Structures are given as structure tokens and as C-alpha cells.
Image: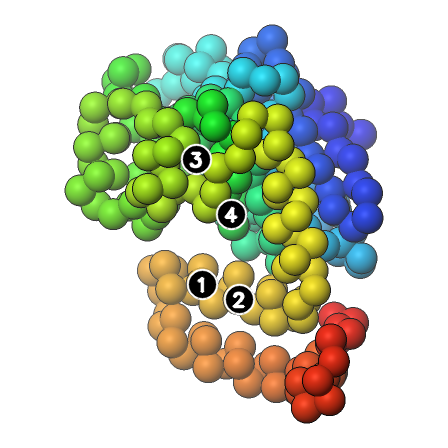
Amino acid sequence: MYENLHIDIQDGIAVVTIRREKALNALNTATMAELRRLFGTEGLNLSGLKGVILTGAGEKAFVAGADITEFSELNAAQGEAFARQGQQVFELIERFPRPVVAAVNGFALGGGCELAMACHLRVAGERARFGQPEVNLGLIPGYGGTQRLVQYIGKGKALELLMTADMIGAEEALRLGLVNCIVPAGQEVAKAREIIEKIATKAPVAIAKVIEAVNAYFAPEGDGFVFEAQAFGACCSTEDFREGVRAFVEKRPAKFEGK
């Protein structure tokens, strides 16, 4: 079903590995199309799904960028369409109603850094490296990098990294707020699984609403506070809310069913 993605689902957690190791897992058109299918309507079954872990094959790279050979001859109109298509794929990931955790096991450069930022959380291996080197090619990030990097690390530092094309290591990425935690190399997926298992003990409907509400803060249209109030109200009508209250009063763990 997928040529460039390997999907392993165990205990409700889907580990999705981009497997183009010889190309350092670069995002070519075929891989982007597979990501679109996976996170779109034809992909993962949400029933029983706790979350998704995205990682790259091998030890060198999470994703070392986009496949430059595919867009080296684009004109302005084609380039805009190319970028917008990539943005749409990453927006599907950002809006996915289950937690998506990037397990960054090496280089996350260009489109790879943008992919990691589209995930809800990022676990970095100690050898992980992040960067947006597009200006070295006479380009800028096109898959949301100029927007999400500012959200995570602030305008001044984002401008510095975008304009110098400097790479940063895992420790600086953690200090800046780009990643959530650092683990020894090889433990990225295990830590991501641990995080998803913890989230899975919470109310699934509420988790989905958290994702929607946080995304609403950055949406150019609408009012995030209004959306939050609406989402709060929607949660109040769920069976999970009633179970959560009963469990709190009865001093026992809640048993949420996602309803």
C-alpha cells in the first residue's frame, strides 16, 4: 500500500517510518503523497488508535530535506503550487485528532524540520540536528517553516536561523523550545511511545479538542478564545466528561471510552 512509508501498529500506536535511507529520507513527491493519504481520509483508522510516531529509517537522518531534484526547474507559479501542496499535507498532520510525535533520530533539515514542527510533539535523540538551510539554494522554506519556527522559538531567533541557515543541536533545540525532550540515540521511538501511552490515559475527545483549540490560536481567521469556549462546551456534553467527574469524586482512575 505504501512504498516509502513503513507502518507498524502495536497496542494502538502507529510507528510510521520514512524509509528512503539512501536519500537520507528526503521528502520526494511520492512520499508526500503517501503522507497525505496516511493522514487523510484513506489512512489510519482512528478506532483504538492512541497516537502516531513519525521517524526516519537508519541512524543518520529523520528527514534531511526535500528532494531538490524535483523542484529545481520550477517557475514562480509552479513553485507556489508545489509549496502549497506541501503545506496542505503538513496541515493534515498538525490537525490530526490523535497525538503525533516526531521521533527525531538524526538530521531534520529543510522539509524534515518542517515535518517535525508539524507534529504535535518532538522527541530528539542526542545526535539530532535541526535547520532550515533553504537560503543556501536561493529559496525559503515552503512547507510552513517560516510560520511554525516563529511559533516555537520566537521571531528574533527564527529570523537568525532562517537567514544564516545555521544548524542547531538537540540541546539548543530544547533550550529554545523546539523539542520537548532529549533522549540517548536509539531511544527516540521508545520515549515517544511512552508519551503517547500517558496521553492515552486521558479523555480522547478532550485530547482532540486540545489539538483543535491550540491550532485555533494560530489560525488567521476566527478567534481562538471563542473556539476554546465552544470546545469546552462540546466536552461538557460527552460521556467522557461525566466519567471523569465520577472518577474524581470516587477517587479512582477514569475509564474513558472516547464518547
Q: Nearer the viewer, residue 38 or 162?
A: 162
Q: Choose the circle earlier in sequence order: 2 or 3.
A: 3
For the residues labelled 3 and 1, the Cα–Cα distance comes to 18 Å
Residue 131 percent across, percent down from the top left: 35, 27
Query: Mark 3 touching mark 1, by CB under 8 A?
Result: no
Query: Mark 2 touching mark 4, by CB under 8 A?
Result: no
Q: Please, is residue 13 above or below residue 72 in the view?
A: below
Badge 2: few (under 14), some or many (20 or more) residues near its Cα, within 10 Å? Answer: some
What mark, if any, has residue 214 been given in the picture? 1
What mark, if any, has residue 210 been given in the picture? 2
Q: Nearer the viewer, residue 97 or 30?
A: 97
Where residue 98 sits, quadrant-wise, is bottom right
For the residues labelled 2 and 4, the Cα–Cα distance comes to 13 Å
Q: Amino acid at mark 1?
A: Val
Query: Mark 1 touching mark 4, by CB under 8 A?
Result: no
For the residues labelled 1 and 4, the Cα–Cα distance comes to 13 Å
Tag 4, which secondary structure?
strand
Residue at screen point 73% across, 75% down: 253
Q: Nearer the viewer, residue 56 or 230?
A: 56
Query: Mark 2 touching mark 1, by CB under 8 A?
Result: yes
Q: Choose the circle earlier in sequence order: 1 or 4.
A: 4
Residue 241 percent across, percent down from the top left: 67, 83
Which residue in the structure is indicated by mark 4? 121
Q: Nearer the viewer, residue 175 or 238?
A: 175
Q: Please, is residue 38 above or below residue 165 in the view?
A: below
Which residue in the structure is indicated by mark 3? 114
Q: Choose the circle earlier in sequence order: 2 or 4.
A: 4
For the residues labelled 2 and 3, the Cα–Cα distance comes to 21 Å
What mark, if any, has residue 228 been given in the picture? none
For the residues labelled 4 and 3, the Cα–Cα distance comes to 13 Å
Q: Amino acid at mark 2?
A: Val
